[in-house]
Image (spheres, rainbow, N blue to C red):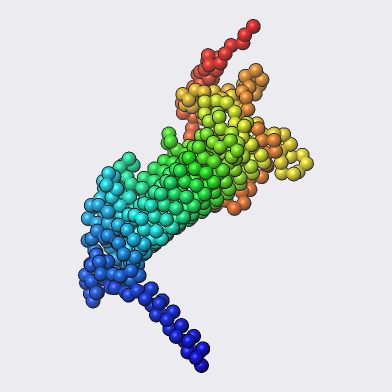
Amino acid sequence: MAQVAAIAIDVMLVAVAVLIAQGHTLVVGADGGDYPTITAAVTAAAPGDTIRVRPGLYREHLEITTPVTLLGDPGAVIYGGGTGIVVHVRARATLNGFTIRASGDRLVTEDAGVMITAADGTVIEGNVLEDVLFGVYVKESDSVRIIDNVIEGKPLDVPRRGDGIRLWYSHFGSIEGNRLRRVRDLVIWFSNDTFVRRNRVRDSRYGLHFMYSHRNRFQDNEFLGNHVGGFLMYSSDITFHHNVFAHSRGASGKGLAFKDTDRIEATANVMVKNAIGIALDNSPTDRDAVNQFRGNLVAFNDVGVSLLPSVQRNHFVSNTFLDNVQPVAVSGGGSALRNAWRENYWSEYAGFDANDDARGDTPFRHDRLSDDLMAEHEGLRLYELSPATVVLNAVGRAFPLLQPEPVVIDSSPRLDRRNEGTPNVPPDQTTRPSAPLGAAFAVLSVMSAFAARRWSRPRWRT
């Protein structure tokens, strides 16, 4: 009996401890609430308390310095009045179910909808942030979770916008299921071991802006209609799987770009309808590192893959290069042969498969004369889609003396374009633009190309 009583007492003590840990529930609201304002409830709350906020417009700037949970009923709006930071979290907290509106618009003071400072383990979930400069800004706070929020920036020109989500020296974070629109960037700087999944960023500058961060994973995200889909710099051990980078146009338009980045694994991603699908600058930089691109769909871009002449040790295996104006280009001229190209599908390939093994019997070579000239003379891109390029490339094939060094050689090109596991891509609705100046300028462009080639290369010596 004594043993049973002791067990019963232990169970009661555990139950009491759980109740104490859960804290009390404080209700905010004009009708029957314990407190008329959220600020009053936060001030009165003890660690572990829950603050439930009823529907209404709360014109407040919150400062959370006690570990609490804030739950907003549908229609609970925290309104910042267009000044400063609307909610500043300085202790571990959960913020769920609110509309947070109208931060300030000053970049110098980093006005934000939600600012998190030195508050490890904070959770920002299921909120709508509207008319905010920065959306959720995390500083020196580990294990923060930002989940299922909708964030829309202020109607400002791109240079004056703040970031939709920014991590700064904040490790082990999770950014999942958020929808960002009309912000500057989604930023991850100096933040390691972060998981970024199921987010959509559109109509912004950089869908993903990433520097000095390592061992991060990106999965099932969509970066649509941004100036640049994703730009990674000075980082290593990054995994991309099943993401979409689409509709990044203009002079800086890149789907996914890397600078000084090591040990990348990019599998089953889609880069579609960008100015450049994948851009590589000094990546990898570590002499022992290799970047892997496998099973990706690179389609309908002006340039599928763009590299600087010194780039090497990137492995492109079993990717699909479909209807890009140029499948691969080297900026300034040269070849990409110091990288590995194996078993990729190339829509330009014109070979046969006599033994029916779904592999071409001859290697794929990309060595168009027009591409070689345009890499050296950017002004000639005016004629890129003109009939003159067709004539020029035919001339290059007919006269071996004019044939340029191959940019890419794939010794075993695939003849099927299956990319199992890649995200679904809607049917291509775009049409190729017509020749910039029409067929009337075909002869002129050919003459210009030959002149450029003549004067840009050393003459034969005797």
Q: How many marks?
A: 0
Q: Quadrant of the C terminus?
A: top right
The one nearer the camera, 428 or 52, is 52
As drawn, the residue found furthest toward the top would be: 462
Q: Position of residue 204 (x, y in %)?
A: 38, 45
Q: Is residue 292 above or below residue 86?
A: above
Viewer can see residue 289: yes
As drawn, the residue found furthest toward the bottom would be: 1
The one nearer the camera, 240 or 39, is 39
Q: Is residue 93 above or below residue 310?
A: below
Viewer can see residue 151: no
Q: Is 183 displayed left or right of 235 in the figure?
A: left
Which residue is pictured at 30% across the width and 62% down the height?
A: 65
The one nearer the camera, 207 or 427, is 207
Which residue is pictured at 23% across the width and 52% down the height?
A: 83
Which residue is pictured at 26% across the width and 60% down the height?
A: 62
Q: Quadrant of residue 78?
A: bottom left
Q: Is 456 displayed left or right of 405 in the figure?
A: left
Q: Position of residue 158 (x, y in %)?
A: 34, 42
The one nearer the camera, 259 or 374, is 259
Which residue is pictured at 38% across the width and 77% down the height?
A: 19
As drawn, the residue found furthest toward the right would be: 355
Q: Position of residue 420 (x, y in %)?
A: 62, 51
Q: Quadrant of residue 396?
A: top right
Q: Position of residue 203 (x, y in %)?
A: 39, 46
Q: Is 365 displayed left or right of 176 in the figure?
A: right
